[in-house]
Amino acid sequence: MKHLIFPIAIEPGDSKHAFGVVVPDIPGCYSAGDTIEEAYTNARQAIESHLEALLDEGLPLPDAATLSEHQRNPEFAGFMWGFVTTRNIPALRRAIRINISLPEVLVQEIDTYAQARGLSRSAFLALAAEHEMARV
């Protein structure tokens, strides 16, 4: 699956202040974290949530600016910069039907496992595939 990459502006944190995150390409998309790692994780979730909300409302996805354009913005003076890779939410919205063959016992186990977690078979298989591919 093709992923989307967004630049993020990170306001430095310390032992008393969280790391603040701004996603310049997505107006109103902010996040934070007590550690830099947490800030990245929360930024990814914020970006994906914003993209989903825009799609739900039928609004266009924002155009991306270059990192150098963002760095020239005085609003971000003193910020660090990074990149967050997210799932391609628009591509995930377009479901396609496929036909696969699996052993009957495995299908039953998948259905039991998925149902116990409030997932459909398709949702479980998609998550399992993403998880496996992320390990590479």
Image: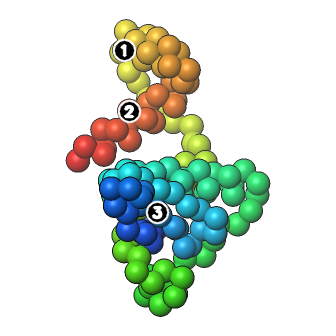
x and y percentages locating residue 95 in the rendered image: 59, 43
Q: Nearer the viewer, residue 92 or 102?
A: 92
Alpha-carbon span between mark 2 and mark 1: 14 Å
Does 126 sit above or below residue 112? below
For the point 44% across and 15% down, which residue is it?
Answer: 113
Q: Earlier in the sequence, mark 2 or mark 1?
A: 1
Q: Which amino acid, mark 2?
A: Ala
Does 12 sit above or below residue 3? below
Q: Nearer the viewer, residue 121 or 27?
A: 27
Q: Nearer the viewer, mark 3 or mark 2?
A: 3
What residue is disc 1 on?
A: 106
For the point 52% across and 88% down, which residue is it?
Answer: 74
Alpha-carbon span between mark 3 and mark 1: 45 Å
Q: Mark 1 falls on what kind of element?
A: helix
Alpha-carbon span between mark 3 and mark 2: 32 Å
x and y percentages locating residue 37 in the rendered image: 32, 53
Q: Which amino acid, mark 3?
A: Gly
Check the image and tell me how it is coloured.
rainbow
Q: Nearer the viewer, mark 3 or mark 1?
A: 3
Q: Mark 3 falls on what kind of element?
A: strand
Q: Which mark is residue 118?
A: none
What residue is disc 2 on?
A: 128
Q: Residue furthest left?
A: 136
Q: Earlier in the sequence, mark 3 or mark 1?
A: 3
Question: How many other residues sit within 10 Å of disc 1, few (<14), some (14-19) or many (≥20)?
Answer: few
